Amino acid sequence: MKNRHLNGGWIWLILFVLLSACRTEFEKIRTSNDPEIVYTKAMAYYDEGEYLKAQTLFELVLNSFRGSAKAEELAFKYAYCHYFQSSFVLASHYFESFSNTYASSARREEADYLNAYSNYLLSPSFRLDQQYTLKAIELFQIFINTYPNSERVASANELIIELRKKLEQKEFEKGKLYYDLKNYSSAVHSFENLLKDFPETDNAEEVRFLILKSAFLLAENSFYEKQEERYEEALSKFNDFKKKFPSSNYNAEAREMVNQSRAKIKTLSK
C-alpha cells in the first residue's frame, strides 16, 4: 500500500513538472520581445488548435507586422481565433475590420461571410431581442449582392430564410399574446404587420382568421357608439379572409361571426 502511494506521488510529480515545462515554454516565448519568434510560435499554436495561446501571441505582434507581408494573414487568423473560441461578437468585429483593411484580399469573401455567420450564431430564441438576427439578415443580403457568383450564396439564402422564420414566429406569438390578453386592437395590428412583413408565411390562413376574430371581439367589447363601425370592420375582415381562403376549415366559425355582426348592425342602425 505504501509503495502504491509513493508511485502515485511520483506520477503527480512528473505531471506537474511536464505542465510546468509547457507553461514555462509559453511564458518564455510571450516575454521574449522577439516578434519573429512570437509570430512563428503563434502560427504553430494556431495550426495545433491552441487558439487562446495563438490569440495571446498574435496580440503581441499585430502592430509589429503592420504594413508587412505577414499582416494580412495575422489579422485573418486573429479573427478566426475569436471565432473558434465562440467569441462571436469579437469575431464579427475583427472579420469586418479585416474586410475594411484588406478590401482587395482574396480572403475578403470568406471574412464577409463569417462576419454574417457570426451574427447568425449570436441570434437567440425568438422570445428574446432580435438585434443579431436582423444584423445577420442584413449582412447575408449584402454578401449575396456583393458576391452573386459565390458558392456560399446558396447557404446565405437558406440562413436568411431560417432567420426570417424566427422573426415571423416572434411576430405571430406577439399577436397571439395580445389576443390572449384581450387586447384585440393590438392583436389585429400585430397580425396585419405579420402579413405585410412575411407575405410568404405558411400561417396566412390562421393569421387572417385571427384578424377576423379579433376584429369581431373588439366590436363585441366596444362602447355602444363604436360598435356599429367596428362590426362593419369585422365584416370587411371576413371578406378578406373568404377571398383568400374560400374553402377554409374555419368557415363555419367565420360565418357565425358574420351572422352575428350583421344582426348587431341591423339592431344598432335602428
Image (cartoon, grey):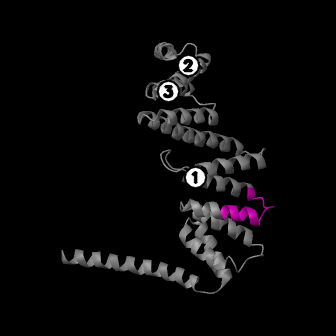
- Nearer the observer, 32 or 212: 212
Region of the chain picked out in magenta, as a range: 94-108
Which is nearer the N-term, disc 1 or disc 3? 1
| Residue 62 vertical placement versus 123 (above, below) | below
Identified at 71% across, 67% down, the residue is 73
* Disc 2 residue type (three-letter): Leu
Instruction: Return the residue at label 1.
Output: 131
Which is nearer the N-term, disc 2 or disc 3? 3
Query: Magenta region's main secondary structure?
Result: helix
Secondary structure category for the residue under label 1: helix
Residue 114 sits in which quadrant? bottom right
* Disc 1 residue type (three-letter): Gln
Question: Which quadrant would the N terminus be assigned to in this image?
Answer: bottom left
Would you say residue 12 sits in the magenta stretch? no
Q: CA distance from mark 1 to mark 2?
A: 38 Å
Q: CA distance from mark 2 to mark 3?
A: 18 Å
**Badge 3: few (under 14), some or many (20 or more) residues near its Cα, within 10 Å?**
few
The numbered dot on residue 225 is 3
Instruction: Return the residue at label 2.
Output: 235
Q: Quick one: which residue is furthest to the left in this view?
A: 1
- Nearer the observer, 79 or 34: 79
